[in-house]
Image (cartoon, grey):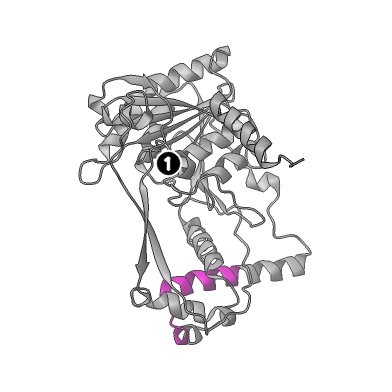
Amino acid sequence: MTTSAVKNNFLPPGLVSNLQEVLSRKNGQLDQSKNKGESTVPSSSDSLEENPDIDRSKPIIVVTNADGIESPGLTYLVEALVQNGLYNVHVISPQSDKSLSGHSVTLRETVAVTPAEIKGATAYEVAGTPVDCVSLALSGALFSWSKPLLVISGVNRGSSCGHHMLYSGVVAAAREALISGVPSISISLNWKKDESQESDFKDAVSVCLPLLNAAMKDIEKGNFPKGCLLNIEVPTSPSTNKGLKLTKQSLWRSTPSWQAISANRHPYAGRFMSNQQSLGMQLAQLGRDASAAGAARRLTTQRKLVEVESVGVAGKSDSKRTVKYFRLEFQDKEQDDVDENLDFRALENGFVAVTPLYLSSHIELDTQAAVSDWISSAFQTDV
């Protein structure tokens, strides 16, 4: 693919650069493998890159998040845990913001994993979801261990109360650890636009640190609650919180609002889709490979690319189809429930809300009976 040919396709220069770099690297790897008869896939020993300065006698703590490897919430949390000096801190986090990824995983696609520089910790950034990060960390494929003492997910920008827990990537990461039998805690800060500031993340960590230290000590003693994860919601002003409060998960949720977006606001998007066939790859896959290429550029600084994702081939395009664009936003709404023990209500009242979350849903007895009666009547045969 030449530069002039790409210009005729009206592609953004940044995408062109990343795409060309990915393709040229892949071609070079294939040629090298043909000449030497060797596989281009790194071995497990190449992928494993432990910090030689780690004291292996200390328990291991895994830290992840959903906002991305460079988010301030993660930075302040890791900094505090490292300064603690009692544990080996391993960080594995998404490359970019995956806050609303829920419990999604990347299946049957190659995921790029890149070492990251975080002082005092062994760290990786992953071109995947928060659940990918935890699943990979606990698999034994990346690290030489498979079961840490605790997985901490956070600190997330924005609350994860009520039904938002179903969308939340930060809660999903903790849930994935619980599924694997590892104690876990998720942390979110009730971030408010035009009111919150970056230093609030540091204050949120300071507020949560005593609870985290207590959890780690009790896990070692076998006294930590089993079968649940703890979701911690920190109020907008962490330094003036009213204390910890044990809460219940509410039914609170924001209202989803879909907005139609004019194609004129995305000129490159329409032209790119119409040239899909000639490029031979899907838009989504190009985005992932472009991300991998961006990560590869950091080879010249202080990072080493472990693995680069594969390039997919698109199906046939249909230029006669009309493409429409929409954008989803969540809008807050007033809540009628006045129960002071619900997560969102305690958070609004200035408390640090601590909610135990379980893998199994606890259905009320009257609901169970109602469903049983309905099934009996629905399948009752007339005699």
Are there few (<14), some (14-19), or many (20+) residues within 10 Å of tag 1?
Answer: some
The quadrant in which the N terminus is found is: bottom right
Left or right position of 129 against 202: right
> How many numbered markers are drawn?
1
Is 18 included in the stretch rendered in magenta? yes
Query: Toward which corner of the image does residue 131 lie, by quadrant?
Result: top right
Is 294 included in the stretch rendered in magenta? no
Q: Which residues are magenta?
A: 7-25
Query: What amino acid type should be assigned to the residue bearing mark 1?
Result: His
Q: Residue furthest right?
A: 37
The quadrant in which the C terminus is found is: top right
How far across and how far down the image is residue 367, in percent?
A: 55, 30
Left or right position of 179 against 263: right
Q: Is residue 60 visible?
A: no
What residue do we see at 34% from left, 32% from top?
344
Of residues 235 and 112, the one nearer the viewer is: 235
Of residues 325 and 144, the one nearer the viewer is: 325
Where 265 sits versus 359, above or below? below
Q: Secondary structure at mark 1?
A: helix
What residue do we see at 50% from left, 77% from top?
273
Where 133 sits versus 280, above or below? above
How far across and how far down the image is residue 243, in percent?
A: 30, 19
Give the residue number, with chain letter if any, for mark 1: 164
Type of secondary structure dominating the magenta stretch: helix
Q: Residue furthest left?
A: 194
What residue do we see at 24% from left, 46% from top?
193
What residue do we see at 41% from left, 77% from top?
268
How far across and how far down the image is residue 267, in percent?
A: 38, 78
